[in-house]
Amino acid sequence: MLSRGETLLVRKEGFEMVFKVVDLIQKRVSATLAEPCYENLTSKDEMNKFNSWYVSKVSNEKREKGVGRPTKRERRTIERFKDK
């Protein structure tokens, strides 16, 4: 169980992020409403490393209008391409 003032170490995808609990929320809320309830204590170097990794993972994929959804073969080709 969490309590106010507690510090959490979160390890995700090889990154170590540190957060401090400022306030507790009784139910799930949007990220915008949850943001004032924690303080991000992660070092700038670690956040920069995480942000550059995250941005490189996210890319807009577009298909020509009217082409429809990719077939199973096309999806496999796309996945192989993205893994490289």
Image (cartoon, helix red, strand yellow):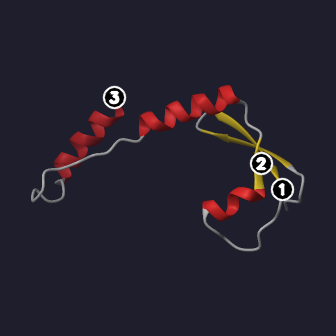
Q: Nearer the viewer, mark 1 or mark 3?
A: 1
Dot 1 and dot 2 residues touching (CB under 8 Å): yes
Q: Position of residue 66 (x, y in %)?
A: 9, 59
Task: Report helix, strand or loop for mark 1.
Answer: loop
Q: Amino acid at mark 3?
A: Lys
Residue 25: image x %, image y %? 77, 69
The answer to whether mark 3 and mark 2 are in CB contact below 8 A is no
Distance from the alpha carbon under mark 3 to that under mark 2: 35 Å
Q: Are marks 1 and 3 in contact (CB under 8 Å)?
A: no
Residue identified by numbered label 2: 39
The reply, left or right, for residue 46 in relation to residue 57 is: right
| Distance in Å between CA atoms under marks 1 and 2 | 7 Å
Counting residues from the start of the chain, the first of labels 3 and 2 encountered is 2
| Residue 56: x %, y % from top left | 43, 33
Q: Mark 1 highlights which residue?
A: 22
Q: Where is residue 14, by image quadrant?
A: top right
Mark 2: amino acid = Glu
| Residue located farthest toward the bottom when viewing the structure as drawn | 27
Residue at 18% across, 50% down? 63
Q: For marks 1 and 3, give the CA distance.
A: 41 Å
Tag nearer the camera, 3 or 2:
2
Q: Which mark is residue 84?
A: 3
Q: Is residue 50 left or right of residue 39?
A: left
Label 3 crowd (10 A; few <14 / some 14-19 / many >=20): few
**The residue under label 1 is which amino acid type?**
Val
Quadrant where the C terminus is found in the figure: top left
> Picture coordinates of residue 76 (x, y %)?
24, 44
Q: Earlier in the sequence, mark 1 or mark 2?
A: 1
Is 45 drawn above or below residue 42 in the view shown?
Answer: above
